[in-house]
Image: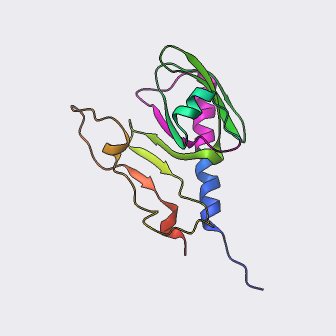
Amino acid sequence: MSRTIDYGNLMHRAMRSLIQNVLTDIQKTGQLPGSHHFFITFDTQHPDVEIADWLSDRYPGEMTIVIQHWFEGLEVTDEGFSIVLNFGNAPEPLYIPYDAIKTFVDPSVEFGLRFETQPGDDDDEDDDVEAPMDEMVEDDDDAPRKDAEVVSLDKFRK
């Protein structure tokens, strides 16, 4: 019997664990260190995502949140995290399971993770094409820019 190592799923678990560890540290201190901030894009249709109806109506496929200056109620678990963010001066609670996360970016240190589609998806067309960092976050005209390192798991799949 031939057995193989599923590196794709192992990497996904490791990358989600990294996000959990980072958010757990933020939960303990209640603030982000230095100029760190996060752009997290997630699948709003994931069955375990909990967001207000008006947000899921406005973002029917995916949504990007920014964790930076104001947030509260950050609670991190093994399955995901909940947080309250401000949308037009209206605080809204969100629950995002790690499995729903598509990208996690910290532009302050040019770090990013991208979760590719899971095996079983039939479209092989350019799944490993990554957007440059400048397209994912707002430009700071005064800061020098270089390409971010985004991890793409499709490069390792057969």
Which residue, as the protein is rendered here, is positioned at the far top?
89
Q: From this view, report whether residue 71 is shown above or below residue 110.
A: above
Q: From this view, report whether residue 144 is shown above or below residue 87.
A: below
Residue sitting at 73 percent across and 84 percent down? 2
Q: Position of residue 21 (x, y in %)?
A: 62, 39
Q: Position of residue 37 (x, y in %)?
A: 45, 31
Work out whether residue 56 or residue 117 is closer to the camera in this orientation and state it: 56
Displayed quadrant of residue 78: top right
Which residue, as the protein is rendered here, is positioned at the far bottom?
1
Work out whether residue 140 or residue 43 is closer to the camera in this orientation and state it: 43
Which residue, as the protein is rendered here, is positioned at the far right?
1
Horizontally, residue 146 falls left or right of residue 136, namely left
The quarter of the picture where the N terminus appears is bottom right
Residue 44: in magenta span: yes
Residue 113 visible? The answer is yes
Q: Position of residue 146 (x, y in %)?
A: 28, 47
Q: From this view, report whether residue 47 is shown above or below residue 88.
A: below
Residue 17 visible? The answer is no
Q: How many labels does the image show?
A: 0
Residue sitting at 33 percent across and 50 percent down? 132
Residue 157: in magenta span: no
The residue segment tinted magenta is 19-47
Work out whether residue 59 or residue 139 is closer to the camera in this orientation and state it: 59
